[in-house]
Image (cartoon, rainbow, N blue to C red):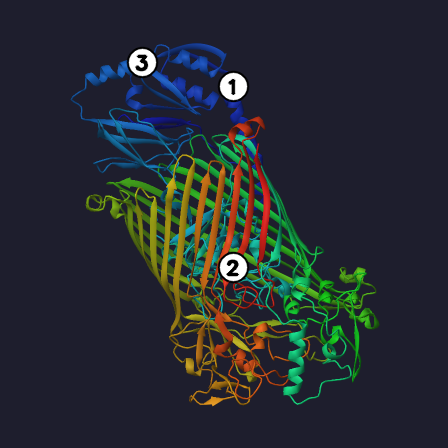
Amino acid sequence: MNLIHYQGGMCFFLQKKRTSRGKLIKYLAVMKLTIILLIATLQVSANAFSQQISLHFNRASLQEVLTSIRKQSGYTFGIASSDLEKAKPVTLNLKSTDIDEILQAVFADQPFEYQIQHNIIMIKLKESKKKIETASSKKDQTTDLIGRITDTMGRFIPDANVSIVGTNKRTTTDGTGAYLFKGAPSSGRLLVTMVGYESQTVNYSGSPVDVRLKVSISSLDEVRVIAYGITSKRLTTGNSGGITAKEIETQPVSNPLLTLAGRTPGITVTQTSGMPGGGVTIRIQGVNSIGRGNDPFYVVDGVPYIQQVLPTLGSNVLGQSGDTYAFKNAGSGNPFSYINPADIESIEVLKDADATAIYGSRAANGAILITTKRGKTGASKIDATFQTGISKVAHKMNLLNTQEYLEMRKEAYKNDGIPLPTSPDWDNYDLTVWDQNKNTDWQKELLGGNAHYTDAQVSISGGSGTTTFRFNAGYHKETTVLSENFSDRKGSFGLAINHNSLQNRFKLQFTANYLMDDNQLPTSDITNMAITLAPNAPALSHPDGSINWQRILSGNGVDSLSTFNVNPLSYLVQKYQNKTNNLVSSFNLSYNILKGLDLRSNFGYTSTTSDEVTIFPSTALPPEIQNSDYRMGSYANGSISSWIIEPQLNYTHSISGGKFDFLLGGTLQSRQHNLRGMDGMGYNNDAVIYNYQAAATLTAREPFQATYKYSAAFARLNYNWQDKYIINITARRDGSSRFGLQSQMHNFGAVGAAWLFSSETFAKQMLPSLSFGKLRASYGTTGNDQIGDYGYLNLYNNYNVPVPYQGITTIKPNKLLNPYLEWELTKKLQVGLDLGFINDRLLFSTNYFNNRSDNQLVNYALPVMTGFSNIERNFPATVENSGWEFSLNTINLKTKDFSWNSSINLTISSNKLIAFPGIETSTYANSLVVGKSVKLTRNYKFAGVDPTTGIYQFYAADKSIVTTPNSVTDKTYLIDRLPKYFGGFQNSFSYKGFQLDALFQFVKQQALGYEHGFGAVGVSNFNQPVSVLQRWQKDGDRTIIQKYSMNLPASDVQSSDAAYTDASFIRLKNVSLSWSLPKGWISRMHLQNFRLFLHGQNLLTITKYDGLDPETLNLNSLPPLRVWSFGVNATL
């Protein structure tokens, strides 16, 4: 037995001693053992409350008796030590008696009364006794003040801040919510604060003083997850933002990153493909690196998560995500497609150095922290959600019809001085073979289908005061607008267990989320074909569904549509399949050594494995050339696995009205990447192509294998003086295996400070309507090691060696080493102001950021004579991202039945290359300009169309007008492709059981447009936008579209400023309407909750952009789809 006995009238608690269960041998073994121990713990706890107790004492002290009861029952006792001295001896002889009878017998002749709160029995002097003693000590001015802080359910709140108003006395509660002040004023006011709860001030005139806190409804006090801890918007010194499950659940998306779009200032979310599992790119406060490594750091339940998938076979259909820093080629899709959005409790975005520096080099571009759902104390409940819906392409381009198209084609022949063809040839079948009156809207035919959306989720959760659990399972399926034969199917499972000891000294958290994904798509995105295919092209399939291989004669013999103008349906029989299994697990242990001193450790393991195959069957070719030589398959399997261990020591202490919080820790991480692949040819029939062993010949692809190791030591000191002045200091020393020995280690750090001036007397007097005011600032350094592995070593391989030596396979250099690689450094300065008015009904926040990244890691091109195309190296270039973030949240109206809330956020950003010594002699001389954005394009300055010749004209560098500009000297017009500003506007309405939410997203940007057509205007089987109808036709015409021609190139105008257009947009990003049935109806259904809902995504877009979608800005990718889904949620 451990007896914590504080002298001078403090509390003592009798506590069970814990013994070690053994050493941690393997992480997975610990997981299994944990589950077994927790089940056993639950059983033991259940038995403790139903046990019969036996006591045999003769004139024993009360302390001895209580100790015996604790050992037999598991109950813990709390009593003031000064009161304990007044206890009478106890004589008892009881056998197999329940706890109630035991307590009545023990305290029958004692001057005490007791109260049972969960597993704690609080003991205090009887009121009559207390009054007598109070009367006899009226002259005493101080007392030992004790009490307990709980929530409204009676659950202990550890680490709550308790202070006596008007004094410097301040402390924090222990694991059981208990606090103690020695020598406190005999009466006064007690202030209790805790992150996530409403602050409460209570008057007291004696001890004990128990306080129950309510969960805060103010967004300032909501719990916000930060690196290695939690905080609130009220008390943070850093710049962060995020969303909760409430916002996530209203969006019918399969990638949780998409839920951030338009909701958080400073972050851009770009969906690069509308295919299921398609790419998503995230940028936080701009682009820091010239070349690569601009992805943020992702953390799921405290475990680092992969930023990029391995290079895959599906990059033609899924699109890319982010940067290619660790691999030779970008992977397709996005790794967050393997995280179930329904399992997420919150997503936090950390932006400044104060918030991210403790992550060191991994968070130079910000960090995104995902926390999954946990069980909650209470009776077990089952929550089930089912929804189904449809998706469609939201917008079609306005293209030429058959009459306009044929007019264009014939006019091109005329302008080129070529007679119209009379006999079929490969470049004129649209004029000589195809129906001249047939008009087909190929966008409707190929992209106009309905994609179906199905999602089902079920969870079981609950728990006692010491142990909670949550188990969830989900199923998700999305088809495509191309065909019902293609779909992405996912099955997911999750488990979360939290366990605290009775005294809250020992804490355990375990989470594991597993997802299986089977994504079957065509090998290529046919969006571009649907736009450019001639409107009079013949039907792509016969009535029986077989592909139409209409033949044409050419001067070289017999050719087919598949040879010169591929039938889009041929890509739909070429199939791509990706089967991925993804596991993210974490295991956290914490033990309270002494009051305020906690030892804890985080363990994490992630694993992503994928098996891919693409098949090219004979049916993808005309029957006359179908044979085994054309049957092909490609196969790949890859894996990324990672483990991490982070031991930590956390100490909190209150002194002189302030609270210190000191964290010391370390990180050990290892990540392994593996990728293998092969190509097969010569299959006997199409059915066996999925089996690579059936191939006549197999050719291995270049394998990929790498191990990344990372270690660090970190510390953080936070000092909070009376919730008025807060300072946060962070330091970290990082080590990365991506650099040589002389540069592997580097130091990073940050300092942040906040002043809650609304707590000052002058602010209360001068600004009575100001309910909250905080000024904050931070400065710090972070690093970047997002490059390939082993760049400092000579690497060799034997793949595809061109000349074997005497028949012996040799090896060749794989890349050129650079032993002098160093960390890329980012310095971040941010200043913010947060204001609240009218009891926080109006909350305003603004933030200025200035981030500078130097010592850039880039791929530097080399002369061909070196034998290598490039080398990874550092450049003394400096990139600056600066700007302003604004957010405004208002409670416009709130009554008993109706409420209306609004929020708007705006980010104005600027990107600039402020220094690049020696740029004139570098390979970046023609792509970067000091003082301009790193994402600029050099363009010709458009001079219109020559009214005499009808040919495009451009301004040369010397201001003269030319028709054939010089690609090196005449590209003088610079265009920044990064957004100028972006943000979102949201309204939420509720009336009784109805809830309506609407989110608008807006972006101001420039992008490549299509006013001048898709390439040369007039070539065979290549449709164009209707804007080309405004072309030059005769001498004197003044227009911006040159004459139709099959020979005049369009590359120059597409490389000019005329090709760029305003691609700004306002989009109704999300609408959610729900109805929760009245409680009377629900109770008759024996349910806790029943809700019907309708969700919509990407419903309306207002833009001048003339392409398919202003977000993807790409005619080669399917745009984000418009989604409608209807569903039901029930809780048992």
Residue at mark 1 to residue at mark 2: CA–CA distance: 67 Å
* Of residues 340 and 1015, the one drawn nearer to the viewer in this rendering: 1015
* Of residues 297 and 995, the one drawn nearer to the viewer in this rendering: 995
Neighbour class for label 3 at 10 Å: few (<14), some, many (≥20)?
Answer: some
Kindly indicate the quadrant of the structure image that contains residue 983: bottom left
Q: Is residue 311 rendered to the left or right of residue 81?
A: right
Between discs 2 and 3, the one toward the N terminus: 3
Residue located 63% across and 69% down the image: 531
Nearer to us of marks 1 and 2 is 2
Q: Is residue 90 rendered to the left or right of residue 246?
A: left
- Disc 1 designates what residue? 51
Q: Is residue 166 rendered to the left or right of residue 897?
A: left
Q: Is residue 656 rendered to the left or right of residue 666?
A: left
Between discs 3 and 1, the one toward the N terminus: 1
The answer to whether the residues at label 1 and label 2 have Cβ atoms under 8 Å apart is no
Q: Is residue 1049 visible?
A: yes
Give the percent coordinates (x, y) of residue 497: 53, 38
Q: Is residue 460 above or below residue 958?
A: above
Helix, strand or loop at disc 1? loop
Give the percent coordinates (x, y) of residue 654: 29, 40
The answer to whether the residues at label 3 and label 1 have Cβ atoms under 8 Å apart is no
Which disc is residue 111 wearing? 3
Residue at mark 3 to residue at mark 1: CA–CA distance: 27 Å
Which disc is residue 1101 wearing? 2
Give the percent coordinates (x, y) of residue 919: 42, 80
Which amino acid lies under the numbered mark 2 shown in the image of this protein? Thr
Between discs 1 and 2, the one toward the N terminus: 1
Give the percent coordinates (x, y) of residue 46: 53, 25
Q: Is residue 274 above or below residue 473?
A: below
* Of residues 234 and 85, the one drawn nearer to the viewer in this rendering: 234
Helix, strand or loop at disc 2? strand
Which amino acid lies under the numbered mark 1 shown in the image of this protein? Gln
